[in-house]
Amino acid sequence: MITGASSGIGRAAALAFARAGDRLVLAARSQAALKAIAAECVAAGAQVRVVTADVTRRETVEQVAETATAAFGGIDVWVNTAAVMAYGRFDDVPADVFDQVVATDLLGAATVARAALTRFRTQGHGVLIFGGSLLGTVVTPYMSAYVASKWGLRALIRALRLENRDAADVHICLVSPGAVDTPIYRNAANFAGRFGKPPPPVASAEKVATAILRCARRPRATVTVGTANRVINLGFLMTPALYDALVGPLMRAGGLSRERVAPHNGNVFAPLAAVDPQSRAHPSWARPIAAGAGFAALAVLLARRYTS
């Protein structure tokens, strides 16, 4: 079962599971995008059901679970990658946009957990995998709603693990990548004046999907995907003053493109029309070598400060 299956990491995970021979229930808000990825999964040899669902609406999440039970007799693995994003200073992002990002990325994850764990505990087994983020352990400016949601998600998962220690074969996992080449940056709500982009180094959605597939087979509490994640985490914890001094300028250089954009709500409240779910982040993310060098320099500086 994959909620958030229509694009990005969720879409890549759907294809990875399909190629591995698993039976799938795919859910997302966009029916057209779901049909497209379902067709690819069927072509790969998988049995597939699709359900149009929104993780902020509990009844649709329950419908996803009921579809899986009716079609395949139960759920072995539930992957939730459903997420939206908003760019801008906290005081520039409208309150309803901020609240909806949190409702999707954190409260939606809680809704999925409630549906999944109820069934896993009843059947005695199951693997629940959440798509997290490096931004669940560090902070960047201009993404306050997303950062708050991902920090909250990490805390929620930790609490759920503690409460389910009596269920030895129920696993709750977090797969946390750094920047990933997906459409979320272009589709995000934006009140920063410039489109967002994944700051280098950038991983592919397929790399994260591979980590999710491995986690489903051999559950691990937390899986990190990204070459610089551990160093950045250490710097955030061990040298906060240096981190805070550098992350703002580097975010403006490496996390925001040069392409101007008027304020808009992106896909926060509803799927965007005529968006290619296979599209990647805007190709401009690969151009600014100076920005990539800047983030690499940040990692080096943090590592040196930590080890000196």
Image: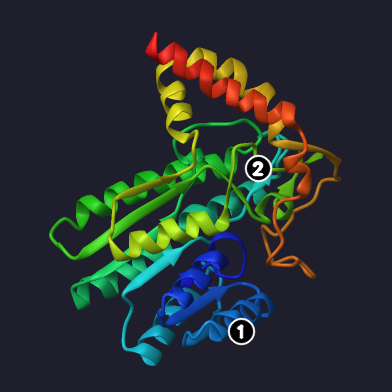
Q: Secondary structure at mark 2?
A: loop
Relative to 223, say whether 258 is above or below. above
Asked which quadrant contains residue 198, the reply is top right
Kindly identify the residue that appears in the image at 47 percent across and 53 percent down. 106
In the rendered image, residue 21, in percent from the top left (x then y), is placed at 41, 80
Q: Secondary structure at mark 1?
A: helix
Kindly identify the residue that appears in the image at 42 percent across and 56 percent down. 211
Relative depth, front residue between 163 and 229: 229
In the rendered image, residue 41, in percent from the top left (x then y), is placed at 54, 80
**According to the image, label 1 marks what residue?**
39
Kindly identify the residue that appears in the image at 41 percent across and 22 percent down. 237
Q: Spatial distance from mark 2 to mark 1, Cα to Cα?
A: 29 Å
Identify residue type, mark 1.
Ala
Q: Which mark is residue 198?
A: 2
Asked which quadrant contains residue 195, the reply is top right
- Give the total number of marks visible in the rendering: 2
The quadrant of the picture occupied by the N terminus is bottom left
